[in-house]
Image (cartoon, rainbow, N blue to C red):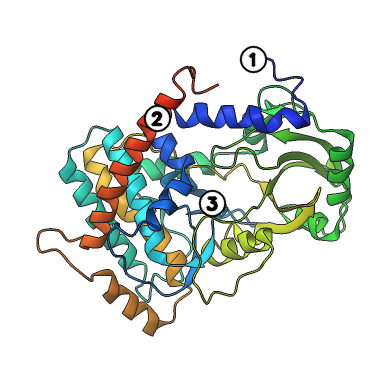
Amino acid sequence: MGNYDNIKSHDRMSFLMAQRNRKMASSVQAYVRGSTKKFYEWLQDSDRPELPEGPPVWICGDCHVGNLGPVSDVDGSIAIEVRDFDQTVIGNPAHDLIRLGLSLAMAARNSVLPGNVTARMLESLVTGYEKAFAVEARHETTDHINDMPKIIRMEMHRALGQSWKHLADKRIGGKSLIPIGKRFWTLTANEHAAVVGLFAEENVRNLTTSLRERTDNAETRVIDAAYWRKGCSSLGRLRLAVLMAAGHGKNERHCLIDVKEATEAAAPSHKAAEMPSDHAERVVSGARQMSPFLGPRMVAEHILGKAVFVRELFPQDLKLEIETLRRKEAMNVAEYLAHVVGRGHARQMPPGTSRHWLAELHRNHSKSLDAPSWLWNSVVDLVGVHEAAYLNHCRRYPNIDNPSA
C-alpha cells in the first residue's frame, strides 16, 4: 500500500475504502466522525428517545467538533463557524445539537473525564445554544478572542498568524506544483481537460478573482491539478486540488482551490422543505445560511457529470482539533461551540419562532439535570451505539495497522 504514484482512476475507490476503514479504526472519535450514516440510522430507530420537532431551518447535518473551526471571510476577518456542509438540509435543529453532544461526549471519554463532566457539558451546551437567540447575539458573526475558551483562543491565534506560505507548506509541501504521491494522485487527460474547462467558467473564474487583492478582470490560469485523497466521511467521492494563478508578473497570486463532489445527504430533511434538487446547490445554500464567512466563498458547478462545490482554501481556515479536554475547560468549550451553532440556527428564525423553539427545547426537563432529558438520553444511547459499532468495525478489519497512513 506504500506505492501511491501509480494509482489508476479505476482503482481509486477500492484503495480509498481501505484507507477509510483504516482511519475509522484509529479511534472511536475517528469512527464517529466517519460514520454519519450510523447517526441517521439511529434517528430512524423507533426505540430511540423521542425528540422535539424544531422549526425547519438549514442545519449542518454533521455537526461534530471537527466540522467547526476558524474561517476567514473575503476581507480577512476571522470567526469560528461551521465549516463542513456535505450533509446540510432544511431539517430539525435538534439533530445538530445531538450530534454535537455526541462528539463532545466522545472527547470527554477520550480524555478519561468522569461521567458527571459529560453531564455538565451537555448542560453547558444548552446554555450556550440558548444564549445565541438573545437579540444582541443572533446576528453576530464574530466574538472577541478573549471571550473564547483557551483551547479555541489558541486556534484563533494560530489562524491569525497563517499566510499563503503556511498553507502551501501544509497542503502541497511548499512546492510550485502539486506533489504526486500519498495525498495527491495524477489525473487522467480527460479529467485534467475537464478541470481546465471548469475554471474557464465565468462563475468559477469570478470566485478566483473576487477574493483578496485581486481585480475582477485579472487573468487566471490553471497551474496544476490532482485527485485529492482527503477526509474520512468523504473518501470515495470526487475530490480535486487545483493550483491556480490570478494576475500576472509581479502581481500574480497563487491560490489553492478545493473541488468536492456533493452527493445525496443522509440527514433527513423536513417533509415540507423546498431545497435545491442539485446537491451542490444544496450545500452552498446551507453554508450561506449558517456560515456567513464561508458561504459566500463557495460556488456550485458540475464536472465530469458530477455536482461539485468549489471554494478557495484560505490559510486561516483551520479545523478544530480537540482530541482531549481538560476538566476545567470542558464546559466552556461545550458552551462556546453550541453558541456558534445556535447563531447559525437563530438568524434563520423570526422572534416568535425562536421563543417557541426555546420552550420546546426544555420539554421533558429533568429535575436532576439542567440539560433536557431528550438530549441526555439521546447522547447516552448514541455513545453506546457507536462504541459497540466501533469495536465491531475493528474486529471486522483486524489486520489494519498504522491508522495514520
Q: Is residue 260 above or below residue 143?
A: above
Q: CA distance from mark 1 to mark 3?
A: 31 Å
* Residue contact at pointers 1 and 3, CB within 8 angstroms: no
Please give the residue where the numbered disc 1 appears in the rendered image.
Answer: 2
- Sooner in the amino-acid sequence: mark 2 or mark 1: 1
Residue sitting at 30 percent across and 55 percent down? 335
Residue sitting at 33 percent across and 60 percent down? 46
Please give the residue where the numbered disc 2 appears in the rendered image.
Answer: 27
Q: Give the residue type that dot 1 points to.
A: Gly
Give the left or right position of residue 365, taking residue 111 as reference: left
Q: Position of residue 277 (x, y in %)?
A: 67, 67
Please give the residue where the numbered disc 3 appears in the rendered image.
Answer: 83
- Sooner in the amino-acid sequence: mark 1 or mark 3: 1
Give the left or right position of residue 21, taking residue 278 as reference: left
Residue extending farthest bottom: 352
Q: Is residue 252 above or below residue 172?
A: below
Say which mark, if any, is on residue 192.
none
Looking at the image, which is closer to me, 210 or 56?
56
Q: Give the residue type that dot 2 points to.
A: Ser
